[in-house]
Amino acid sequence: MADVSRGSAPGGPGVNLSKGQAISLEKRGGGTLTAVRMGLGWQAAPRRGLFGSRTREIDLDASAVLFADKQPVDVVFFRHLVSDDGSVRHTGDNLVGGAGQGGDDEAILVDLQRVPVHIDQIVFTVNSFTGQTFQEVQNAFCRIVDETNGDELARYTLDGGGQYTAQIMAKVHRAGAGWQMTALGNPANGRTFQDLMPAILPHL
């Protein structure tokens, strides 16, 4: 696991992760986390046109796929907002984005204590449901927050855009008695999480 330093201000920025970097999910003062929020944010990139630059709304969708021994067993997304076991919950669909560097546009809550023992990995993805590529998105990020006190533990910011319509952002996975988050940032293509399964499997 990479050696990383934490931000010190309560609720302030946590570790800035680079692609492939992992961080142990624990409270700033020590101890294990009970509930975390994976927040995702983005902004529409301005487009230059005949009458100056303008932006169009971008509908990105966050999903969480729950795996047991590399097999998908459940998914949380805008059409299935709560996992069957109740441990993972989507806060609702955001059709336009726009928070960017500020708050979360979409968030998925994970009650780590309620995740069934056979679930060993949860992979977080973002899809462009409307088919726009990430060339039209800026300031896209995912961050993990201690849901009990609002402390941001880690943040992963996407660099630049590209000719793809999805990102496999990060995964939360068991590590001994606790959990780790690993930043993935892998570009992919697809409007829904089902389209991404072949791209997710190498990261498990």
Image: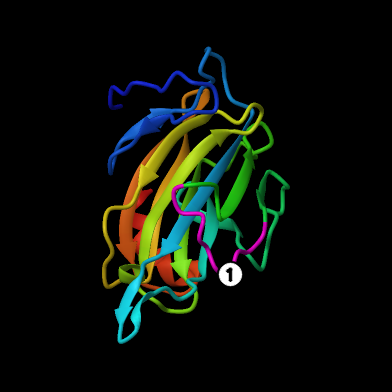
Left or right of 92 on screen, residue 59: left
Judging depth in this view, the residue of 141 and 124 nearest the camera is 141
Residue furthest bottom as drawn? 50
Left or right of 50 on screen, residue 115: right
The residue under the point 38% across, 39% down is: 182
Judging depth in this view, the residue of 86 and 167 nearest the camera is 167
> In the picture, residue 154 is in which quadrant?
top left
Amino acid at circle 1: Leu
Residue range corresponding to the magenta coloring: 92-101
Q: Position of residue 172 (x, y in %)?
A: 47, 40
Name the quarter where the N terminus is drawn: top left
Q: Position of residue 186 (x, y in %)?
A: 31, 56
Judging depth in this view, the residue of 126 and 75 nearest the camera is 126
> In the picture, residue 188 is in which quadrant?
bottom left
Secondary structure at numbered mark 1: loop
As drawn, 167 above or below 149: below
Q: Position of residue 127 (x, y in %)?
A: 46, 67
Residue furthest top as drawn? 29
Left or right of 123 on screen, residue 95: right
Is residue 24 found inside the magenta-colored segment of the image? no
| Residue 180 in view, yes or no | no
As drawn, 127 above or below 154: below
Residue furthest front as drawn? 51
Q: Position of residue 31 (x, y in %)?
A: 56, 15
The coloring applied to the image is rainbow
The residue labelled by disc 1 is: 95
As drawn, 184 above or below 174: below
The residue under the point 52% across, 23% down is: 177
